[in-house]
Image (tube, rainbow, N blue to C red):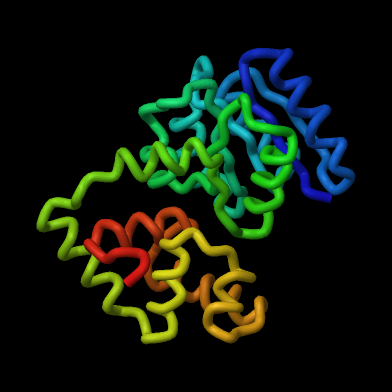
């Protein structure tokens, strides 16, 4: 079972999320929280695998709670929730280590996929959020571009192939088909790439490729 913490300051939203997730059969909501500080405490106390955090919460907002959770519960995977189609904090959340970002008006299937992907070590963005992120990313300034390119040069050729396909948004299964690898081998490469690049997740690695000025299709 995937142990999930749901943090939102609207009880009706929390109840709806619980109902959706527990209908999946392999997901259990082990804790709920109404603010960011309570979410951090609950994640530690209940040993959650995945946390769903609303961006806008009292005491600690979702971004501050994300930062705190990364320090105190480094193995926890976090998916951010937002009611806003043009949420200005999407990039901050993803660069801060969130494994996904979904809108509250997403379908039940999307929400379940996001939790399963985060638990598996993958990243998940709602399609609307993906379009938003691509529109928000601007060309990196020269210093950031050089730093990103330097980090990417530490990769072996096959590792570079993998990170470029991550930047295309491909799943491990798709990367395996593209490169003629088994999925377990791809997972090993992805883990190695993230460690070498000091990236918390696939989204950070993809953003690094963009910062370096490399087209994902290159």
Residue 84 x/y as whole percent: 48, 22
Q: Residue at x 74, y 27 (%)?
A: 17
Residue 190 x/y as whole percent: 52, 71
Q: Using the rendered view, name the quadrant where residue 16 is placed.
A: top right
Quadrant of the image containing the C terminus: bottom left
Q: Residue at x 72, y 26 (%)?
A: 32
Q: Residue at x 66, y 38 (%)?
A: 43
Q: In this orientation, which residue lies closer to the viewer: 40 or 186?
A: 186
Q: Residue furthest left?
A: 142
Residue 46 x/y as whole percent: 75, 39
Q: In this orientation, which residue lies closer to the viewer: 45 or 1?
A: 1
Left or right for 184, reference 157: right
Q: Residue at x 63, y 51 (%)?
A: 118
Left or right for 28, reference 111: right
Q: Using the rendered view, name the quadrant where residue 142 is placed.
A: bottom left
- The vertical placement of 36 against 94, above or below, is above
Can residue 170 be seen from the camera position used here? yes
- The vertical placement of 28 against 87, above or below, is below
Left or right for 89, reference 28: left
Numbered-mark total:
0
- The vertical placement of 106 against 72, above or below, is above
Can residue 71 be seen from the camera position used here? no
């Amino acid at each position: 079972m995937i142990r999930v913490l749901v943090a939102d300051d609207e009880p009706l939203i929390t109840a709806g999320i619980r109902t959706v997730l527990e209908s999946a059969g392999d997901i259990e909501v082990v804790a709920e929280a109404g603010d960011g500080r309570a979410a951090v405490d609950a994640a530690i106390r209940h040993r959650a695998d995945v946390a769903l955090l609303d961006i806008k919460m009292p005491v600690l907002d979702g971004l501050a709670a994300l930062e705190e959770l990364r320090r105190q519960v480094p193995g926890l995977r976090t998916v951010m929730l937002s009611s806003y189609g043009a949420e200005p904090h999407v990039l901050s959340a993803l660069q801060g280590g969130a494994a996904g970002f979904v809108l509250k008006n997403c379908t039940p299937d999307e929400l379940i996929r996001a939790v399963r992907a985060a638990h598996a070590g993958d990243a998940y963005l709602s399609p609307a959020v993906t379009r938003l992120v691509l529109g928000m990313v601007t060309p990196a300034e020269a210093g950031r571009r050089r730093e990103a390119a330097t980090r990417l040069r530490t990769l072996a050729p096959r590792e570079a192939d993998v990170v470029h396909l991550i930047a295309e948004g491909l799943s491990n299964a798709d990367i395996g088909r593209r490169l003629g690898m088994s999925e377990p081998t791809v997972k090993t490469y992805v883990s190695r790439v993230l460690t070498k690049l000091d990236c918390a997740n696939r989204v950070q690695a993809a953003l690094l490729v963009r910062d370096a000025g490399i087209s994902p299709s290159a």
